[in-house]
Image: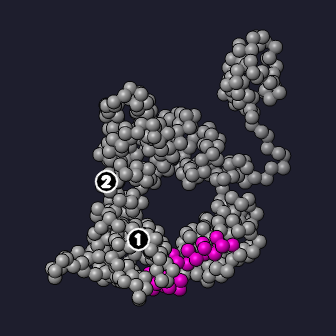
Amino acid sequence: MSFLDNLIKTALLGTDKQSVEFNDAPESIQALTHALPAEPEAKLLQLAAMTINYEKAGKKANSLPADFQGDECAPENLPLIGERAQSVLENLLYEKRIALILFYLYRANQKQQLISPRLLPEMLSFGKNNLESKDLILPFVGNRGRWLAAQNPAWQYLLPHNLEEDWLHGTMDERKKALKRLRNAQPSKVIALLEVIWTEESASQRLDYLTIMEKNLSTNDEEFLKSKLTDRSGKVKAEAMRLLKSIPQSEMSQQVWENVSACFSIKTKKKTGDSINTNLEIIFKATESEEEKPEDEVENAEQTEKGNTYVEMLELVKTILPTRWEKHFGLTVSELVAVMGNSKKIKRFLGAVIEAVIYYQQEKWARILLDSEQGNDARLIAMLPYSEREKYAIKLLKEDADEVIETMLNEDYQEWSLLFTQKLMEVAITDVYAFNKDFFKKLIPFLHFEINKEILNYSFQDDYRKGYWKGTATEISYLLGLREEIKQVV
């Protein structure tokens, strides 16, 4: 803890509970303590003023050791941001406006501009505490920033990592991160690494490793996963089995499909007499001897002769590639979605299919579901191209605002339409305490600027909510102003 931090702590606790300790004070401040007033409160205030000025004055740079053999920094070939842009960035860093700093970095990188050298240390330190910004910081700091990062261990997060070294010698958290990145880049290499250490790891670690393998799952993983079905941990065996079921071409997935598909068929509904209703219904029949029942008549707790409850069968439906149902029932996706919407209870089957649609990222199914009355799962929106998402986002915003907003965030920082921003505000004012300043901080780069004209005009039934929203709206307005200033300078 720095001397300034100690002063802040004393101010928070009160000088009657904690006195100022000078052990951590810089020498130049210690030399002036004799001139401080005797009263504790006055002494604290003067010390704070002196320390803040001391911090602003900067520090003498450390000298390089005589035997320093570092490489020279490569020259820069891109222009620096302008003076006004430097001032804006400095203010953002001071106020710790993370979302707007990321927005700033994106725009500067689009224009291929580099940070001013005097702001490099602060930017590199910002990145250390906000690792999600690494990919945006890297081009912005240029050769000079990368050179500096190599000289300071605290900034070496910016340098390329040897993932295999991290895997072999890192902490458990570092090993998991390395394994995730390797799984993205070289999926098959992960299996070779795991085989070497598998028997030495704890059950919880083995389970974590299998969970990481879910990314880029393919038939290349089948033999490895089958070998884990005899693991000494029941949880590890269960996870290996789940992953095997999730590989559509695997032997186990095929067995599951044959079992489940035999239990579901489709028939034409018949009315009283011989008149035929063109509506269809899904029939559940688990065994040859069991009477066929419409899906909406099956009870959750029903036990079949095979030992499978209907709920257990639906759990297996979640692992099945949705396109298989098209072939099995001989219907198009639109026809299947319509059949599944024939009754309220049949939605249990539809719900299981939707989980599979999301797991296997079936864009065609997602679009048709969202166009129907049955597609009320906001996670489906993320499967569509960004240009198609807004109308569905508006449709589902009231039902699941958090999930909808996640689908509308974009790496290109496209501003939302005024209509979507207005609809979001309409939802926000229904619960001003949940949709508060912290909620809106990360959304500032995306909100339509024209909302500024309306944001303080909403009416409330009580003064408490009105006052709370005024504080939120004022903050939004201020941050939108900062965003527009960023757009003017970079």
x 54%, y 51%: residue: 136
**251 within the magenta span:** yes
Residue 160, how many percent across, how many down? 65, 59
**483 within the magenta span:** no
* Cα–Cα gap, marks 2 and 1: 32 Å
Front one among 86 and 265 = 265
The number of callouts visible is: 2
Left or right, 364 with reference to 136: left
Residue 464, how many percent across, how many down? 41, 28
Sequence order check: which comes first, mark 2 or mark 1? 1
Is any part of residue 94 visible from this angle? yes
| Residue assigned mark 2 | 395
Front one among 411 and 194 = 194
Which colour style is shown? Answer: one colour
| Label 2: few (<14), some (14–19) or many (≥20) C-alpha neighbours in 10 Å | some
- Boundaries of the magenta span: 233-261
Left or right, 76 with reference to 461: right
| Residue assigned mark 1 | 299
Residue 103, how many percent across, how many down? 47, 45
Question: Hey, which quadrant is residue 484 in on the image?
Answer: top left
x 51%, y 80%: residue: 307
Front one among 60 and 247 = 247
